[in-house]
């Protein structure tokens, strides 16, 4: 009679368990890397959205008001082609005498002074008639320029920047640049 050799399946050997453990660790690390990359992209896109919204809001306000101005009432940005940083002073038509019209009794336009300036807190501040309002946070730079050939066009360049913290010591900076040429109406 021949004896049949049969192997008993009572469990896994130490080597088999180590191989399974290594496979699980590699799969876990791959999943953690994918999730970490997605989380970083989330934070970066959030910072980019904030920088874009701030820049658009400020640029929209600047365009709306400067279009109402006249090239002759821009005080500190002469038509010499040089970029001027941080401040713009100009006038816009406004009903200063309270009669419901921007023209005075002699049919002249009534003007009110407006000033845009940057603050130490990286903001654009609008000042007019004793009131201040913030047009933009997370500002990196803003520049204004007029060319001699087109003195009724104001060029504006505005940079916003938002830093986002990610996992304590890490982070990213999202920047947006906005430029436009504004033709003044008056």
Image (tube, helix red, strand yellow):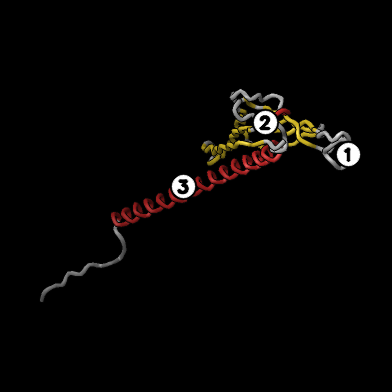
Mark 1 touching mark 2, by CB under 8 A?
no
Q: What residue would you read off at disc 3?
A: 37
Q: How many marks?
A: 3
Q: In which quarter of the view is residue 159 placed? A: top right
Q: Is residue 134 visible?
A: no
Q: In which quarter of the view is residue 153 placed? A: top right
Q: Identify the secondary structure beneath mark 3.
A: helix
Q: What residue would you read off at disc 1?
A: 98
The residue drawn where x is 54% and y is 37% is: 173
Identify whether 80 is placed above or below 54: above
Alpha carbon separation for disc pair 1 and 2: 35 Å
Q: What residue would you read off at disc 2?
A: 121
Identify whether 90 is placed above or below 19: above
The residue drawn where x is 25% and y is 67% is: 8
Q: Is residue 56 visible?
A: yes
Q: In which quarter of the view is residue 145 placed? A: top right
Q: Residue 30 appears at what percent x and percent y?
A: 40, 51
**First in sequence: mark 3 vs mark 2:** 3
Q: Nearer the viewer, residue 171 or 120?
A: 120
Quadrant location of the C terminus in the rendered image: top right
Nearer the viewer's eye, disc 1 or disc 2? 1
Q: Residue 112 appears at what percent x and percent y?
A: 80, 32
Alpha carbon separation for disc pair 3 and 2: 32 Å
Nearer the viewer's eye, disc 1 or disc 3? 1
Mark 1 touching mark 3, by CB under 8 A?
no
**First in sequence: mark 1 vs mark 3:** 3
Q: Residue 175 appears at what percent x and percent y?
A: 55, 37
Quadrant location of the N terminus in the rendered image: bottom left
Q: Identify the secondary structure beneath mark 2.
A: loop
């Amino acid at each position: 009679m021949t004896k049949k050799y049969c192997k008993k399946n009572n469990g896994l050997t130490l080597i088999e368990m180590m191989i399974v453990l290594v496979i699980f660790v590699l799969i876990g690390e791959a999943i953690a890397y994918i999730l970490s990359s997605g989380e970083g992209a989330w934070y970066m896109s959030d910072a980019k959205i904030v920088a874009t919204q701030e820049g658009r809001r400020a640029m929209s306000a600047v365009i709306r008001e400067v279009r109402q101005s006249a090239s002759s009432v821009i005080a500190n940005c002469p038509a010499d082609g040089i970029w001027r940083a941080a401040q713009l002073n100009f006038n816009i038509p406004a009903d200063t005498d309270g009669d419901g019209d921007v023209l005075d009794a002699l049919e002249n336009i009534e003007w009110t002074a407006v000033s845009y300036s940057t603050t130490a807190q990286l903001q654009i501040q609008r000042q007019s008639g004793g009131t201040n309002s913030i047009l933009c946070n997370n500002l990196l730079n803003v520049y204004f320029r007029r060319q001699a050939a087109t003195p009724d066009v104001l060029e504006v360049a505005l940079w916003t920047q938002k830093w986002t913290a990610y996992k304590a010591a890490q982070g990213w900076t999202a920047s947006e640049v906005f430029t436009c040429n504004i033709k003044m109406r008056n």
